[in-house]
Amino acid sequence: MTYYKTIENSDRIICLLCQHYCKIPLGGLGVCGVNKNENGVLKTLVYGHPSALNIDPIEKKPLFHMLPSTQALSLGTVGCNFKCPFCQNWEISQEHTIDERIMIEPQQIVELAIKKGAKSIAYTYNEPTIFYPFAKDIGVLAKEHGLKNIFVTNGFESPEVLNDMQQWCDGANVDLKSWNEDYYKKTLKGGLDAVKNTLKTMVSLGIWVEITTLLIEGENDSNADLKAMASFIADDLGAHIPWHLSAFHPDYKMQNHHATTLKTLKRAQKIATDAGLYYVYMGNLRTQENTYCPKCGTLLIAREGFRILQNHLTHNQCPTCQRVIEGIWE
């Protein structure tokens, strides 16, 4: 795809990477701080310059229905198109200084993943749509070598990027941060409707989707909002879409806000299961996040933290009733 378009009779260009559609003046930067109008062309300044590169359990993304017990080579850069005050990776996401001494080409990323025995590459830590040109070049090569590709995202990709992702992206964990449009716009600097459309588009394109909501008491955990989110997932996306309800811990600009309690997570989980969702997980607290067959209740996968303790799936099916369990298992 072309990552920008020109404006007639103007030196500005429109960045097509996310739904901000920044109109960037000559020499200027987009909202993310890392995409620049350089001589009338969009230049992704972080291309080849990851600020974080690690081997992680895929369960850490979190993805529970994709290649369990495998490792993902995870990478991110500086910069973000949101301004979340609770960001857990704010040291890089809200940073715009690029360490150009670090230069790693897409081929080297893929070679490293293979060398480390990873089965997938995850674009994560900060918002990957802002370094989409770099991610795609890695992802296309990764796919040629039999690796899966994972986007861990705030869901503010442009429709142009989403349609392009279908070629090479296998799975995504998308943040559904709130059910309040004003909160999205004023606090996070994003948009709820855009995220909802991203989720629906990803599902329709065949990208495996799991959703994470970081629950912050008093901000996004009202029963009404939780019921609305659960209904949206069940009715618009599918009851099989896993929902990760994650506990907030004080960080960044919200260090004086109290941590989310287990009671709140359990309340949210009950609302989600009452709405008909098959797979609802509680994260960021020391709880077992097991997968059960939605038909007969058989324990399928037992987890503790990011470790798989038991995996009873047989050819992607429940061993008791043979129901096919949704996900990417191999």
Image (cartoon, grey):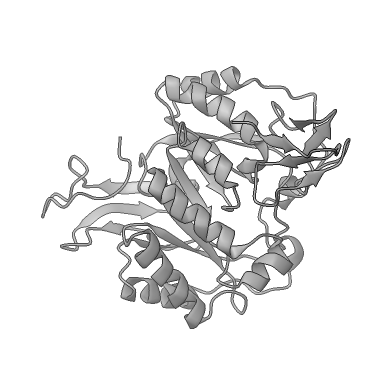
Q: Is residue 196 left or right of residue 67?
A: right
**Is residue 136 or residue 301 the one in the foreground?**
136
Q: Residue at x 72, y 29 (%)?
A: 49
Q: Nearer the viewer, residue 30 or 283?
A: 30
Query: Seen from this angle, which residue lies furthest front?
Result: 9
Front-lying residue, 92 or 242: 242
The residue most toward the left is: 321
Please indicate, yes or no, whether residue 198 appears anywhere in the rendered image: yes
The x, y position of residue 249, in whole percent, is 62, 65
| Residue 213 spot, x, y in % from top left | 52, 63
In which quadrant is the N terminus drawn? top right
Residue 129 placement: quadrant? top right
**As drawn, is 75 to the left or to the right of 13?**
left
Q: Is residue 229 left or right of residue 69?
A: right
From the viewer's side, name the closer residue of 257 and 223.
223
Q: Which residue in the rendered view is the most extreme toward the right? A: 27
The residue located at (58%, 64%) in the rendering is: 192
Q: Is residue 327 above or below residue 105?
A: below
Residue depicted at 39% across the width and 63% down the height: 236
Q: Is 12 located above or below residue 134 in the figure?
A: below
20 is higher (above) or lower (below) than 215: above
Point 72% across, 22% down: residue: 103
- For the C terminus, give its image quadrant: top left
Q: Position of residue 190 (x, y in %)?
A: 67, 59
